[in-house]
Image (cartoon, rainbow, N blue to C red):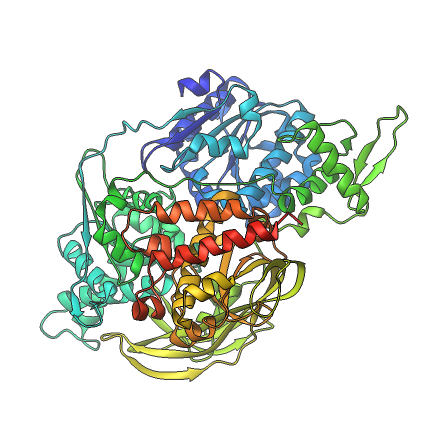
Amino acid sequence: MEAIAEGRDVVLATSTASGKSLCFQVPIIEAVLRDPDARALMLFPTKALGRDQVESMRQLTGSLPRDAAVGVATYDGDTPPSQRRAARARAHAIATNPDMLHRGVLPHHDAWGRVLAGLRYLVLDELHTYRGLFGSHVGNVLRRLWRLCRHYGARPQVIACSATIAEPGALAESLCPWISERGGVTLVDEDTSPCGPRKVMVVNPAVVDEITGVRRDYIKITRGVTSVLRRSGVATLAFCRTRRAVELLTRYLRDDEAAEHSGPRGGARSGDGLQAQQQANSAIRGYRGGYLPDRRREIERALRDGEARVVASTNALELGVDIGGMDAVVLAGYPGTRAATWQRAGRAGRRGKPSLAVMVLSSSPLDQFVGAEPSFLFDRAVEQARVDPLNPEVLLPHIRCAAQELPISQHEVLPGLSAQDTTLALEYLADRGALFHEPGPDGEGCYVVVGGESPAEAIAIRGAIEENFSVLDPAGEVLAQVDYEDGPLYLHPGAIYPIEGRPYEVRELDWEGRKASVRPVSANYYTVAVSKLRVRVVDEVEPGPESGPTHGMGTGYAHVVRTVPGFKKIRLSTHENIGFGPITLPDLELHTTAAYWGLPPKAMAELHEPAERAGAALAAAHAMRFVAAMLLMCDTGDLGHAVTGGHPSAWGIALSGTQAPDALATIEAGGYPHIVLFDRNPGGAGLAVHAFAMGPTLFDRVIATVTGCGCNEGCPTCMGPSTEAAEQYGVGRDAMVVVLRALREAAVVGGASPA
């Protein structure tokens, strides 16, 4: 607060529940009490978090006298028109999100003139979420905001709050480059908030088959660990990696709670049994994306009031939504990053009281690596969030938005760019008809957008936006929402769609109408859709000099298709497969940009067996994707990787960060492997093409990263998910390095250049 009072831009990077919200709420209130024309814009990554903070701030201002009132309002996609007008006209502090700022505020800044002219503070909460391609878009949205603030005569201070990540100050300056021009950011990362001792336990389920190495199901172990805490009356938050795991755990815990309190005549039909089930439903809750806002608010209230003792959640509760004090956190599986691990563990711990965090490991290679190498979790620094707002594929469309909001004068220097780069960008857009240069009477002139459509509508800062599916009960009431991409996985006919553990069967899916009809059922099984992802390069833009049927490299346009051919029925108690059914739904298609590299003859000669080549190529693709993301300052989720069994004009199996291919895919990939990197957003963002343009530099960094890994023969961190080939042929780090070094030599010969 002292740094903010001195006019400095501040980044607060401390643990959960350390008081970060007060550090921006109090200065805002003080500024408004001194100057009623002062305004603050508070940016939150989600609508739920914004509304939670508005309620918190209203409680803080509730005791002020009427003549000293501070107006706090929400402005998001759910805000009714009348409340939107009131927020613009009367609110002093306005909570919104990057999406609404991008599409709803900046293109209509003339209606926001009073707010922008008086803007004193710009709050960026949960700064660590603005990373990768999404963060790059947000950085450009903030540059547009800063340009309009200059136009209206305001120079707001930046107050950013972040979870513990590496170099949060650098992230803030990347998103808001004007901070560097004002002397840099003031970082506050020493956490002296009252916090009791925390014990962290890592639980590795026992091996049940010594030959295959299969371990006990980690969801069942999570159920057992959470039940110990539940029976002891410990307020517990159980984090699961998937929505399905949340629903399974919620149902298991409710059944356990009801069985323990139903009495000797307990049962579904007895009065004691019904009452016990109702009490269990109140004490054990589920929380995930897809629930309607009213349900989420009710669960959050139950947590704060102590009515709900145990909640199973996805990362939806990882952010700073107020849920009161928890005593224990259980993590069902390693979250994927150290930063997310400590963020979730930090949700437990009341003032001065001890807390417990228990991580139950799954059988996945990465989880087992964490279990075998505790130093990976406890002794290494948390990861860094990276962004690249200057990526031309991201930057140029936002410059067009800026010109639509306010004509760009011929000699104006845009925020975050040099004078030369600004001129080059404007001339590039003008040459292609995206901007029009309008000469001025003094010879200066300016760049404007021709046409009445808003360029902001064409930019999806979070990726493709498709209409969600609505889940309807027999009476036509909406029960939940499901993302477009998840529709085929969870709402196919015959699917069991649970809501807080209660099963509903999907009777019909209206694909065009984006709605699924469900009915409540009593089912002792759940369903899992079988998904296949394949990729091919359909149009080469820049083929390499050795491009051909067996090897080569280049860039081009890619076609990625996800097919969901069927689903399995899994028994709840034993998790055994008890049935299978077909699914006939449209494929989900993605047209994007990609880069590819074929295995050179040298690597082919050294790796004789096809499965050995496939395993080494898959491991190399994994390493290339993660290092490319680091160098391109994007998120690993912004890129995908694949291996094809020949030239990538043929279909190849596409892999996610945690998926291991089946035996057939390994055989397919072992012929003449080609590694493919592709952008995972529609149309591409130039990421894979930029990775290709690095040439040997990319492979130098990949080889250094792989050989510098602390493992002996290769691990999930450097090689990715285990494969059939790796297990059968003992493919380790040496084989992967053979592939990478051969690719580096080919890149030198090919002279890869940014096309």
Q: Is residue 470 left or right of residue 55?
A: right
Camera-side residue: 453 or 694?
694
Q: Quadrant of the N terminus?
A: top left
Instruction: Relative to 667, say whether 541 is above or below.
Output: above
Question: Outermost residue, top direction?
Answer: 6
Camera-side residue: 194 or 649?
649
- Residue drawn at x 51%, y 27% is 158
Q: Is residue 253 left or right of residue 747?
A: left
Camera-side residue: 304 or 558?
558
Instruction: Relative to 693, say whether 574 is above or below.
Output: below
Q: Position of residue 366 (x, y in %)?
A: 31, 56
Question: Outermost residue, right direction?
Answer: 441
Instruction: Relative to 426, say whether 472 is above or below.
Output: below
Q: Is residue 46 shown to the viewer in this render?
A: no
- Residue drawn at x 51%, y 23% is 32
Q: How many marks?
A: 0
Q: Is residue 615 shown to the viewer in this render?
A: yes
Q: Position of residue 61 (x, y in %)?
A: 43, 29
Q: Position of residue 596 (x, y in %)?
A: 56, 59
Camera-side residue: 137 or 430?
430
Q: Is residue 696 left or right of residue 520?
A: right
Image quadrant where residue 429 sits:
top right
Image quadrant where residue 554 sits:
bottom right
